[in-house]
Image (tube, rainbow, N blue to C red):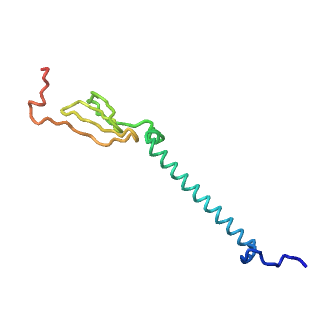
Amino acid sequence: MSDDTAAPLSGEPVKPPLSNGVKAAIMLLVTMGLILVAGVIFVLVVVTKRASHPAEQAAGFAGRFGVSDVHVAPDETVKSVSLAEDRIVVHVSGGKEDEIIIVSAKTGQEMGRIRLRPLSDLASRDPAK
């Protein structure tokens, strides 16, 4: 006679072996858990990288807009051009009034114009005359 059916000596109940379906379910659960943990780690790494290097993101495709038109009248002349943060500022003079044209450095689109109008005749006179 074989001793396979005998109870263990320690007095613990015998656990039946796991079926193939239960083993497959455990393996699937462990695999999905590992994929979930890896995904969370990937998202955290990407967020940390983008937060620590914002200048690299701004210099990507959004920073290259190619050719952009800024409309200046034929009798106007450009006095100065300057770059401030993400804007290009163009000072245009001509006619009666000076204008400041604000252009987005990222998109090349004109954001707006500021007309510089004198308050009185005294302010509009050229001091060189």
At a point 30% along the width and 38% down the height, the residue shown is 102
Q: Nearer the viewer, residue 19 or 11?
A: 11
Q: Nearer the viewer, residue 47 or 61?
A: 47
Counting from the top left corner in percent of width and height, residue 104 is at 36, 40
Q: Nearer the viewer, residue 9 or 105?
A: 9
Residue 35 sits above or below residue 2 on the image: above
Counting from the top left corner in percent of width and height, residue 73 is at 28, 33
Looking at the image, residue 32 sits to the left or right of residue 3; the answer is left
Residue 16 sits above or below residue 68 on the image: below
> Dividing the image into 4 quarters, which one contains the N terminus?
bottom right
Residue 114 sits above or below residue 14 on the image: above
The furthest residue to the right: 1
Residue 92 sits above or below residue 60 on the image: above
Counting from the top left corner in percent of width and height, residue 7 is at 78, 78
At a point 9% along the width and 32% down the height, the residue shown is 121
Counting from the top left corner in percent of width and height, residue 57 is at 46, 42
At a point 45% along the width and 36% down the height, the residue shown is 66
Looking at the image, residue 85 sits to the left or right of residue 50; the answer is left
Quarter where residue 103 is shown: top left
> Dividing the image into 4 quarters, which one contains the C terminus?
top left
Q: Nearer the viewer, residue 12 or 87?
A: 12
Number of numbered markers: 0
At a point 69% along the width and 65% down the height, the residue shown is 27
Looking at the image, residue 62 sits to the left or right of residue 27; the answer is left
